[in-house]
Image (cartoon, grey):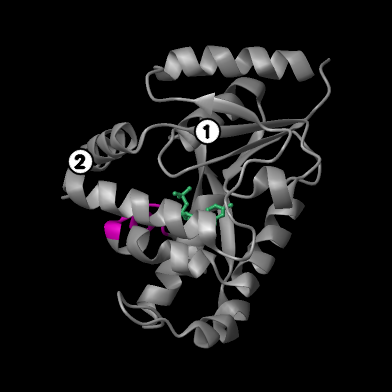
Amino acid sequence: MNKKITIAIDGFSSTGKSTIAKKLARHLNYIYVDTGAMYRAVALYALENGLITATDFDHEGLVSHLPDITLKFIYNPALAHSEVYLNGINVEGKIRSMEVSNVVSRVAAVPEVREKLVEQQRFMGRDKGVVMDGRDIGTVVFPDAELKLFMNAGAKARAERRTAELKAEGREVTYEDVLRNIEERDYIDANRKDSPLQKAPDAIDIENTDLTIEGLFDKILKLVDDVM
Ligand code: DC
């Protein structure tokens, strides 16, 4: 039997990280952890409790509320992946809204938020056999991961894909708003002081502008085979 490993998938927004991570976890029978969903759930909490708006952020208020925030992943057999629960409520649908996308990078820049979520992520991946996607998995959460991928794709291709996905979910979005949001999040995520988005020195670059999901998956499976 192959040994269990940790697979860290980092990269810019909407580069296909979670699609690949989910597919890989299913194929390997590994746990999949969508760390972006955790930051999104905290951002949703901040929005619902009036702690953040487009212009203001009561960031000390959010830090003082952190002990009241409980996040859990519960497996949904119908979808064959886990969904995120905020204080006992399934928020998987709500966290993908543009309202949340527009504030999440500011929430994710707060060191105390990161500290809490990173601790939980390390716990979820403690036994290996995990595929985790995010921005700091290969650099901060699991610097010893056996396989680290760093995904990128052109901003326009990403915005087109993301707009199509959101529309397919029945959300009213425009390509321009999605592109603006992707570019803004990339900037904040890559320039924050605490754990900025950056490629770990030992991560493998995956350029995904022109690849289909199948082409990308085949390429990544070969990389997995090499380390297993
Ligand atoms: O992967 P995503 O687009 O759902 O992530 C939402 C936001 O959360 C993203 O703009 C940056 C932040 N994030 C982070 O700072 N660290 C992670 N490990 C995952 C996400």
Is the residue marked 1 within 8 Å of ligand 1, measured from its CB? no
* Crowd class of label 2 (few under 14; some 14 to 19; many from 20; radius 10 Å): few
| Amino acid residing under circle 2 | Lys
Is 96 colored magenta in this rendering?
yes
Left or right of 99 in this view: 133: right
Residue 135: x percent and y percent?
A: 57, 48
Is 72 colored magenta in this rendering?
no
- Report, in whole angstroms, how far the alpha carbon at label 2 lies from the one at label 1: 23 Å
In the rendered structure, find residue 151 and report the number of the disc placed on it.
Answer: 1
Is residue 77 something that shows in the picture? no
Identify which residue, 129 or 116, lies in the foreground.
116
What residue is rendered at 64% in x and 58% in y?
195
Residue 224: x percent and y percent?
A: 69, 19
| Amino acid residing under circle 1 | Met
Mark 2 highlights which residue?
167
Identify which residue, 27 or 183, lies in the foreground.
183
The quadrant in which residue 223 appears is top right
